Image: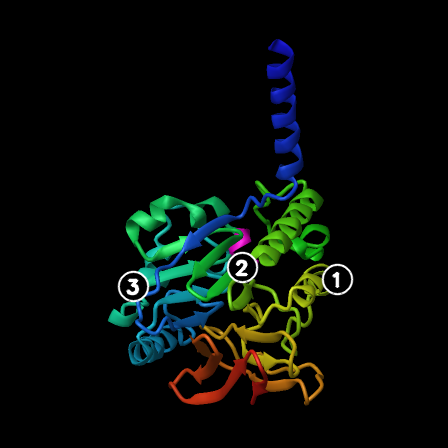
Amino acid sequence: MKMYVCFSVILMVLCIFFISGALSELERLEHPVTKSDGSLSFLVVGDWGREGEFNQSLVAHQMGIVGEQLDIDFVISVGDNFYDDGLKGDNDTSFEASFSHIYTHPSLQKQWYSVLGNHDYRGNVEAQLSQVLTQKDWRWFCRRSFVLSSGMVEFFFVDTNPFVEKYFTDPEDHTYDWSNVLPRNKYISNLLHDLDLEIKKSRATWKFVVGHHGIKTAGHHGVTHELVDQLLPILEENKVDLYINGHDHCLQHIGSDGETQFLTSGGGSKAWRGDIQPWDPKELKLYYDGQGFMSLHITHSQANFIYYDVSGNVLHQSSLSKRSLNI
């Protein structure tokens, strides 16, 4: 009897050991589907937190108008939430000055799902992840990386900041908060493992990956080569539909038929860099060097996305289906 019990315990431990390699540590969330047809609508904005300056308030106003028209379910922020150096702590008044007091339109009183940008990492990262901010403004939700499910869509939010080598080797006069990230190689390895696992087991009709840094971009910062080497292969292997990012202060759509589309929405406030890097015009569907945001409307058969400028004018729209890409 003792031998049987001992064998059972050993077997259970071995099972846990082997299964653990197939488990992900990414936090999972569920956003309820509220529309009768199962569709989903949301806005994407990035690089915005400037206490209303650099046209942030004007962009927010137009977001409110479009949000009402589309009856949005939530808002996605692709990082650089608070300039220039993130938040000093969870009592930093920049939170209210750049978020709560800016995005006041009734249609924007929805959940916000946010990732961190490089400017956020120059402050107190844990402050942005703190429940204290959610107690101040229930809309706020920010994590390094997580998975969001909403009906037919799964979003995979990825912390792209630790991938960028120069933040570690040549930070210039900036100080980054790498607490809970070091050792860096292990952090990146675990994240890539968990992301690949989560995407592979997903049964969602649509799979979108969200990060701060660009993978394909003709913007000022240019291509993030570390992501091209390490993240892009996962997107391609798993046939991810969209990669959505900020970082470059512009609005941008790059993609080829039948492949992952790369959507940049980094025009939440300061923009007009005045430069564009060479890119194949067959892939570069939109490059707008100015302020604005984007909307997405998702059904079972189609994903429609529209870019708007600071005045609410439509700059570009496109639709992606499971059969073909119509541009």
Identify whether 124 is placed above or below 304: above
Checking the image for residue 101, the label placed there is 3
Checking the image for residue 156, the label placed there is 2
Question: Which of labels 1 and 3 is toward the front?
Answer: 1
* Region in magenta: 116-122
Dot 3 lies on which element? Answer: loop
Lower sequence index among marks 1 and 2: 2
Dot 2 lies on which element? Answer: strand
Checking the image for residue 229, the label placed there is 1
Identify whether 128 is placed above or below 9: below
Q: Is residue 285 magenta?
A: no
Residue in the image at 61% along x and 32% along y: 16
Quadrant position of residue 48: bottom left
| x, y percent for residue 41 | 38, 73
Q: Left or right of 6: which side holds 319?
A: left
| Kind of residue at badge 1 | Asp
Quadrant of the image containing the N terminus? top right
**Mark 1 residue crowding within 10 angstroms, few (<14) / some (14–19) / many (20+):** few
Give the colour scheme of this rendering: rainbow
**Mark 3 residue crowding within 10 angstroms, few (<14) / some (14–19) / many (20+):** some
The extreme top residue here reads: 2
